[in-house]
Image (tube, helix red, strand yellow):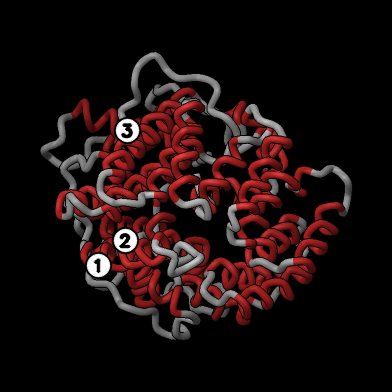
Amino acid sequence: MTVTSIRACLFARTLGVALAIAAAGCGHAAAATPSVPVRDFAGELLGLPTPTLQAPSRLTDTAPMPAALAQTRVELARAFFAGDFATVDRALAAAHTQYTQGGSARDESERLPLLIVDAGLAGAERCERWMKAMPRSYAAFRLCGRLWQRGAWMARTEQTIDKITSTQFALMRDRAQRSSRLLQQALALDARPVQALTMLADNQLLLKEKAEAQATLERVMTMMPRHADAYEVAARFARPEWGGSLKAVAAIVQRAKRADVVADRIAYIEDHSVARPWVTPTPGAEKLYWEKVIAERATYQRLEDFTLYYARLSNWRDALPLLDRSIREHPHVAASYYWRARSREELGDGRAALPDYRLAAAMGNEHAIQRLIQAHIQGALGLPARNLAALAELCRYAAALGSPAGGNCLGSSLWDGSLPGLPKDAALALAWHAFAARGGSANSQHDLGWLLMSQRGPSNLDAATAKAAGNFWLQRAAEQQHGFAIRKLQDAGVPIERTTTR
């Protein structure tokens, strides 16, 4: 699990649940596996059509992308979800070659597809098509393995270990195994498959295959000693909550330094696997830590972590200068625009927040997209209530980037014909709900689950499969504490794997 795939745990920390998570780890799946395999409907199309649409190439009333990297990320996400796999393949292959041959200290082939990765298993169907179309593509099998790895951690949700069900563990295990199979195929497709090897080691550690993982990481570090992700994975699983020790983590940090790993990445490992100031019980200690290390080396990640510290405290005023600096120095990161908009809105200036929300949404930030959808419906942030044309444009644009919120919006609109230019289409509505459900949208998980369970799915789907798939998706929504999903399961007499509600 690289920097990208642990964002769910980091975001949980921003919402105030992280101290428990950090204490328990986004920790080890040491417990329960059910006696029977879990059928993972996230990987099944259920006879639904492939979601397609003509989406705007940019959002109106939005400033141009602030950096070339942000522009490229959006273009690659649009190409991937439109089925233009050759464009994605060329970009990732070129970046991979430049990195592995020493032309770049940073692995841009990891950063370029972040929007695709963040969409999680919303991209599962596209991946299947890409691998079939280009069966010798290292980029295809590597990225698709990364999506299934992301899906494994999504199955885990943001809960602490004591609240994870056996079904969630089984889904996480099975998705990690599926990821590993794709990564094993990727190894034969490139001479220096350092990224696929590192992700494979990550999965092996998650599945408690420690000896295999150590051998895999040694292979990476021998093949390319400066590959930062390998040290990051090794350090994370060497922490005490995974059965290691701080001494073991320190040894990995020293090895990374001897290998001349990029200093920013070493700083990340030290912050997140050694110091971990957010678990310090001493009042004010975390603030002092971030001030000290930012004065020594102001990486983007440190600026973000300090911002998230203030967000947990709802200290939006002190967060703003950090966000201004982050945007000035790292204009390609959509999250900074979202958090600056959020800070301004929390301070009572919704109109000033709107441009940043729009820019973050244009760059594919899921939280900004969700907020703008709400604002268009409710008339917040200085927007007129129920501006349906603008809402349709936003949802179509977002869905084209793989946004679960955008997919949920399209699914709902196509079901009832509520938005202009999106007439009723039950089959396509279900397809978009499936897209969004795979990407983690609790609302689409509920809607898809209920529609399938109540036999309103495709006519070629047998009743038993429809019921099983409906139950599966309602359970996933219930895991996210979706009240209606919990109630539907109770009404149907289906045991709920998690019974707590908001």
Q: Residue at x 37, y 26 (%)?
A: 492
Name the residue type under label 2. Leu
Residue at numbered disc 3? 40
Viewer-side label of 2, 3: 3
Point out residue 249 in the picture as x, y percentages from the top left corner: 67, 40
Q: Tell whether 236 sits left or right of 205.
A: right
Q: Label 2 neighbourhood size at 10 Å, few (<14), some (14-19), many (20+)?
A: many
Inter-mark Cα distance, 1 to 3: 30 Å
Image quadrant containing the C terminus: top right
Query: In the structure shown, which secondary structural element does the residue marked by tag 3 occupy?
Result: loop
Residue at numbered disc 2? 410
Query: In the structure shown, which secondary structural element does the residue marked by tag 2 occupy?
Result: helix
Q: Tell whether 345 sits left or right of 136.
A: right
Taking the view exactly as shown, the residue that stands out farthest to the top is 35
**Mark 2 and mark 1 in contact (Cβ < 8 Å)?**
yes
Q: Residue at x 34, y 45 (%)?
A: 145
Q: Residue at x 58, y 74 (%)?
A: 330
- Labelled disc at residue 422: 1
